[in-house]
Each structure stands twice: as structure tokens, then as C-alpha cells.
Amino acid sequence: MNYETTINADNTVSPAFDGEGDGRLSSRRIWIIGAAVLAVLAAAWFLMHRGDGNAAADAQESQAQVVTVVVPGTTTIAGTITASGTIAARREMPVGVAGEGGQIVQVLVDAGDWVRAGQVLAVIDRSVQGQQIASQAANVEVAAADARLAQANLDRALKLVERGFISKADIDRLTATRDAANARVRVARASLGELGARAARLNIVAPAAGLVLTRAAEPGQIVTPGSGVLFSMARDGQMEMQARLSESDLARLAVGASAEVTPVGTDRKFSGQVWQLSPTIDQTSREGIARIALAYDKVLRPGGFATATLVSGTTNAPLLPESAILSDDKGSYVFVIDQDDKAVRRPVKTGQVSAKGIAVVEGLSGRERVVLRAGGFLNPGDKVRPVVQK
């Protein structure tokens, strides 16, 4: 008789006979053992690959680039506009011949002198006018004598009319004669005053107090009302800078905006205020003029070139150093580190540039971790190890 030896679960040996039921029992045991082996292999494979994944992750973590990041927050930034232009008198006064003119006999001031209102700048020869004034003064005396005589004749006639020696018609005639003589006196005096005024206008005088900028008059020079400007003055010595600005920059300014002006050739800065904005735009250059009022200083020479920094309001925005902002054909951008420590490209719009940094007016709230340096070596999605700059 044929039989098999089998091992039971309790490790006892028992014979197995070749019957049909015994065959089915043996196949089932084989399947159970196979399933157990597969489970063991699967568990081993899982453990092995899980270790590999952790190792790969650890390797990736160890190879991640270290980058310095900054959380910029927001800063109140004063907007500024830089412009160039020329220095000029705020109110320039041209002075010329007001009267009939003549030969200049004396010039009393020079460029750079301060003068008061009505001060004589130059004297024109008035010898002819002096004789005319003397002649007319004599005519005034003659007319006055005639008027006194006419009054005396009238007074005597009034005494005689009571006695009947003089008629009423004679009194009327003498009264008219007296009135005509008095009128001739007034005419003569008016003519004398006119000659005096004409002679006074021969002097070239300052229309207001201020600083003499230029002088174009010399003794012996013949001048007439058509001679043009003999002196130019800055009223009260007030100066200005005429800053040329583009349309967009001009629209950002308002009257009263503060400015700092630096003339060429010096490092001194002069404080001023915009007192007038050009109401028109030059059609060729597309520029307008902002006029910046300045107090007098000898360094401020009209016609000189200068640069100005004008304050155009304030804004709250993140402020980043130049190294944090990159650009390509798509525009300006920064790299932001997300919560998984991966680099994310963020488009931004920059604003004012100053010594403290570049303002980011769009694209950042100020709470992000922004790559401070080495952004040019990153690609979107790169894993990094961020170090926050303190």
C-alpha cells in the first residue's frame, strides 16, 4: 500500500493516503503556503523601496540649494521725480528808456547791485530840457503878474461903481479879464509841470526793489525808447528753477510740492517749492515746466543749469534691494519661496528707485519670503533651503 508522510500543524507526522479527499486537502495547503510567501515578499519589497524613497528624499534635501530670503513688509516711500532745467529770475523786470531818450551821462549801478524802488540807475543829459523848464517858469511868472494886475483893476472898479463912475458892463469886462489871467497862470504852471515830468523821465529808474542782473548802458551812449533793455532785474532777488518734465511726471505734481535743487558746479542743495506748473505742453518735446521758487543765493546764477529732485507724494509698498529683482523678456519678477520650500516665480511691477532699494508697487503683499540673492540660479519648482535674513 502507498502512503505519504505529512507534517501537521502540531509538528506530528501522520501518513496521508492517496484518496480523492486527501488530494484536495494537499492542493489547498500549497495555495496557502504560496500566498504566505507572496505576502512576505511584498512586505520585503515595500520595506526596501520605502527605505530607498526616504534615502532619495534625504539625498534631495541634502542637495537643496541654500538661499537667503527676506520678508520685506511694507514701507512708506516718498515718491520722487528727478528733472533738469535752468536757473532764472522768478520775476524778471526789463528796464529801458521811458522818456524821449538822449545821451547817457552817468550810470550809477552795475550787475549784481541791489537797488530800491525808484532808485536812479542811469542819468541822461537834460541840458535842453533844463532851458525849456527855465523858460516856462518865466512864463508862469508873467502870467501870474498879469493875473495880479487884472485883480487890482477889478478891485478899483468895484470901489468906483458905487459912486456911479463905472458901469456894470465895465465890471463884467474886468472880471472876465481877471478870470482869463488866472486861467493863463494855471496853463503856464501845467506846462511847467509837464516839462518837469519829461525831464524826470530822462532818468532810468528801478521799477521795484531787486537785484540788477544785467547792464547794457554806458556813459556817452545815445538811447531812445527803441533802444531795448538797458538793465534787467530780479524782483526782490527771487530766483527759480524751470524744471522740464514729461507729461506723466507733470501730472504727478501739485503746486506746493517740495524740491531740492543742485546747481551744476556745486554739491550744495537748495530747498524750494513748486509755485507754478505749466498749463501747456510743448507739442514737439511733449514736456512741460515746473517752476520751483528759490531764495536768493549768489550760487544761483540765472541761465545756469541745475538738477532737481521733487517729492510727488507717498505710497506704502514693499522695498527690495536690486539683487532680488530679476527681469527677462516677460518683464520683472522675483522668486518667492512657498510653504513647501519651493521656488515660485512671481511677476512684479517696480516703482521708485532710491538708495534704500526698489519699490514693488504690484505683485507682492510684503508677507512673502522673497529670495534676496542668487535668484538667477533658480528655476520654478526648485527645492531650496531658505535662510531668513535678520
Image (spheres, rainbow, N blue to C red):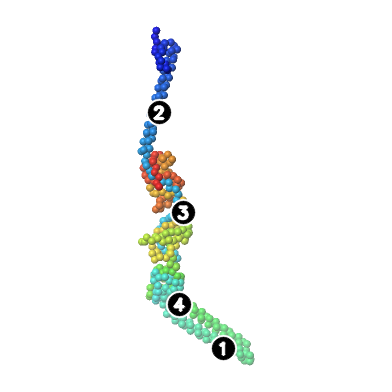
Q: Are marks 4 and 3 in contact (CB under 8 Å)?
A: no
Bin the neighbour count of mark 3 within 10 Å (Cα to Cα): few under 14, some 14-19, many 20 and up: few
Disc 1 on helix, strand or loop?
helix
Bin the neighbour count of mark 2 within 10 Å (Cα to Cα): few under 14, some 14-19, many 20 and up: few
At horizontal 44% and vertical 53% (from top left) the residue drawn is 77
**Residues at marks 3 and 1, CA–CA distance in whole angstroms:** 87 Å
Q: Nearer the viewer, residue 111 or 376?
A: 376
At horizontal 44% and vertical 54% (from top left) the residue drawn is 78
Q: Nearer the viewer, residue 262 or 370?
A: 370
Q: Can residue 262 be seen in the rendering of this structure?
A: yes
Mark 3 vs mark 1: which is more N-terminal? 1
What kind of residue is marked 4?
Ala
- Residue 45 vertical placement versus 243 (above, below): above
Q: Is residue 254 left or right of residue 373?
A: right
Disc 3 on helix, strand or loop?
strand
Which image quadrant is residue 369 in?
A: top left
Q: Which mark is residue 152?
A: 1
At horizontal 39% and vertical 53% (from top left) the residue drawn is 355
- Which of the two discs, 3 and 2, sits closer to the camera? 2
Q: Which residue is farthest top?
A: 1
Mark 2 vs mark 4: which is more N-terminal? 2
What kind of residue is marked 1?
Ala
Disc 4 on helix, strand or loop?
helix
> Disc 3 marks which residue?
314
Q: Are marks 3 and 2 in contact (CB under 8 Å)?
A: no
**Residues at marks 2 and 4, CA–CA distance in whole angstroms:** 120 Å
Mark 4 vs mark 1: which is more N-terminal? 1
> Disc 2 marks which residue?
46
Expressed as whole percent of the image width and height from the top left, the position of residue 91 reads 45, 65
- Which of the two discs, 3 and 1, sits closer to the camera? 3
- Residue 102 vertical placement versus 319 (above, below): below
